Image (spheres, rainbow, N blue to C red):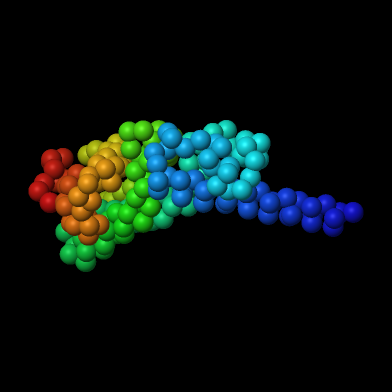
């Protein structure tokens, strides 16, 4: 009997994963075609081949599904967020490369991110992305500090500033009809981000 219970639980877990995956893929496809505010539960359920009741068994609304569907992609984005590079040419190249990967990841699902992060998108998704970036930047600031320069500005404030700036630039970029190449965006954005990492002994910013 115990073995039967384990098997039933595993089968149920697989069904949950399949349903959630189908809903996520349906939402991603729909978000490439229209704004998030114009996507209904019925649209997603139909695209996923499930009933509305099945949708509500897993999510309260489309915005909650959007946040869940974007978790893995947001994790990939976070991995691409660079930390302070200071004066090392090699670290600067790595940072710009990481930032290029960040914008490239956004471009891979431009329609979805435009829908989720734009003015008619999901405040929950935007907040989730900003908090995740801030947490990673804070950790990298703490590790990069190691007594190399004074903490004139608390790391949590600097991390929040960096996250807000990066999300803001990303949203404006996605909504710009020109949609500059990711490498170009990285080259332009990195000096701005790195400027507030660089702090001299007097606590004043120095030129990047």
Where residue 43 appears, as percent x and y from the top left, is 53, 40
Which residue appears at 54% of the width and 42% of the height?
A: 44
Which residue appears at 90% of the width and 54% of the height?
A: 1
Q: Nearer the viewer, residue 179 or 155?
A: 179
Q: Is residue 193 visible?
A: no
Q: Is residue 107 left or right of residue 180?
A: right
Where residue 133 appears, as percent x and y from the top left, is 36, 45
Q: Is residue 6 left or right of residue 47?
A: right
Q: Nearer the viewer, residue 84 or 98?
A: 98
Examine the image and state in which quarter residue 115 appears: top left
Image height of 131 relative to 48, above or below = above
Examine the image and state in which quarter residue 120 appears: top left
Where residue 191 appears, as percent x and y from the top left, is 16, 51
Q: Nearer the viewer, residue 2 or 110?
A: 110
Where residue 150 appears, as percent x and y from the top left, is 22, 45
Which residue appears at 46% of the width and 49% of the height?
A: 28
């Amino acid at each position: 009997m115990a073995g039967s219970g384990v098997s039933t639980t595993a089968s149920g877990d697989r069904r949950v994963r399949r349903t959630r995956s189908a809903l996520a893929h349906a939402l991603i496809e729909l978000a490439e075609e229209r704004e998030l505010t114009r996507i209904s539960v019925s649209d997603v359920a139909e695209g996923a081949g499930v009933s509305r009741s099945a949708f509500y068994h897993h999510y309260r609304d489309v915005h909650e599904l959007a946040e869940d569907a974007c978790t893995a992609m947001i994790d990939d984005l976070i991995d691409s967020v660079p930390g302070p590079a200071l004066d090392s040419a090699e670290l600067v190249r790595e940072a710009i490369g990481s930032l290029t990967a960040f914008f490239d990841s956004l471009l891979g699902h431009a329609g979805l991110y435009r829908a989720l992060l734009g003015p008619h998108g999901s405040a929950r998704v935007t907040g989730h992305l900003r908090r995740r970036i801030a947490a990673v930047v804070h950790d990298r600031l703490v590790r990069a500090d190691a007594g190399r320069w004074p903490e004139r500005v608390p790391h949590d404030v600097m991390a929040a500033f960096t996250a807000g700036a990066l999300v803001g630039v990303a949203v404006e970029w996605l909504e710009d009809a020109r949609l500059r190449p990711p490498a170009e965006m990285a080259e332009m954005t990195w000096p701005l981000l790195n400027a507030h990492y660089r702090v001299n002994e007097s606590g004043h910013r120095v030129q990047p």
